[in-house]
Image (cartoon, helix red, strand yellow):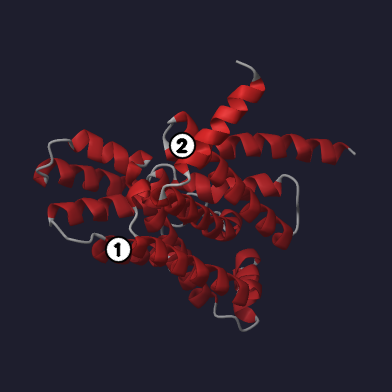
Amino acid sequence: MSAEMILSDWTSKLAEYLQFPFVRNAIIVGVLIALCSSLLGVTLVLKRFSFIGDGLSHVAFGAMSVATVLNLSNNMYLVLPATVICAVILLAAGRRAKLRGDAAIAMVSVSALALGYLIMNLFTSSSNLAGDVCSTLFGSTLILTLSDSEVILCIAVSLIVVVLFILFYNKIFAVTFDEDFASTAGTNARAYNVIIAVIIATIIVLAMNLVGSLLISALVIFPALSAMRVFKSFLKVTICSAVLSVICTLAGMLISILAGTPVGSTIVCADIVMYAVFAVVGRLAAKE
């Protein structure tokens, strides 16, 4: 079969899938989550909180385990507040705590993951515990079963995140690079850390159904690190990171649809490839 025939077959297959509303909804939500996570990803990487996505996703997993055992009709009522509280503690109060940065994140991450799995083993009545845990950790097909209300919620949250980031861009920039100086200049650094924490926690909870709790950090870290290999200014890195994140997520989801591969893992692989490309481009540019 020639390359043209393969391309034509893929195009027709993709067009067929895109006729289904649930596929279009999944792509919309995936792109919006990627955009929001990349905007704050640059800030988190520069503040040495790259793995906060991993830590908070494990907190969300633990809270989801409790919500499952309690048979809550909507686990968001427990998962979102628990994740937000931990995010605020790690980001807003972390500088004055005895355990800072990666140590605090590692402790919270391991503890929440272990407790969540223990709770599910002790109290759940599911006949497919291994499947439930695997889907939560590595992503599931729930992204393809989103209701219209969930899509609208994601769109609304994404708009709020983008608007907040644009409105407070200068303050976020100041807090990112020199929190002490920003506080001296009259900026309420703790308040902006709380805003960042609440936003990133919300994004992580929304993203769990897309890539799973173990892969969420990739959405935060890879686009930012890729952009940093080529660009140096905060604004250029942020814009490039957002564009790369959207492209990789869209490509990963389309490839997943065509090849039948796991959505989350495919998106992460697309991010890895893009990072390798930008690493080469950055090295070539440095030699010139």
Q: Quadrant of the N terminus?
A: top right
Q: Residue at x 43, y 68 (%)?
A: 198
Q: CA distance from mark 2 to mark 1?
A: 33 Å
- Direction right: furthest residue: 288
Judging from the image, what secondary structure is the residue with disc 1 in?
A: helix
Give the residue type that dot 1 points to: Ala
The reply to whether residue 288 is visible in this rendering is yes
* Viewer-nearest residue: 27 or 32: 27
Res. 211 image quadrant: top left
The reply to whether residue 103 is visible in this rendering is no
Residue 257 disc label: 2
Q: Residue at x 66, y 44 (%)?
A: 226
Nearer to us: label 2 or label 1: 2
Residue 177, image x, y percentages: 65, 64
Give the residue type that dot 2 points to: Ile
Q: Residue at x 33, y 58 (%)?
A: 147
**In the rendered view, does 207 fall on the left or right side of 244?**
left
**In the rendered view, does 144 fall on the left or right side of 132?**
right
**In the rendered view, does 275 fall on the left or right side of 54?**
right
Residue 114 disc label: none
- Direction top: furthest residue: 1
Which residue position is annotated with label 1? 82
Residue 240, image x, y percentages: 69, 53
In the rendered view, tell whether residue 167 sits above or below residue 104.
below
- Direction bottom: furthest residue: 186
* Viewer-nearest residue: 35 or 174: 35
In the rendered view, tell whether residue 287 sits above or below residue 49.
above
Question: Sequence order check: which comes first, mark 2 or mark 1?
Answer: 1
Residue 120, image x, y percentages: 17, 44
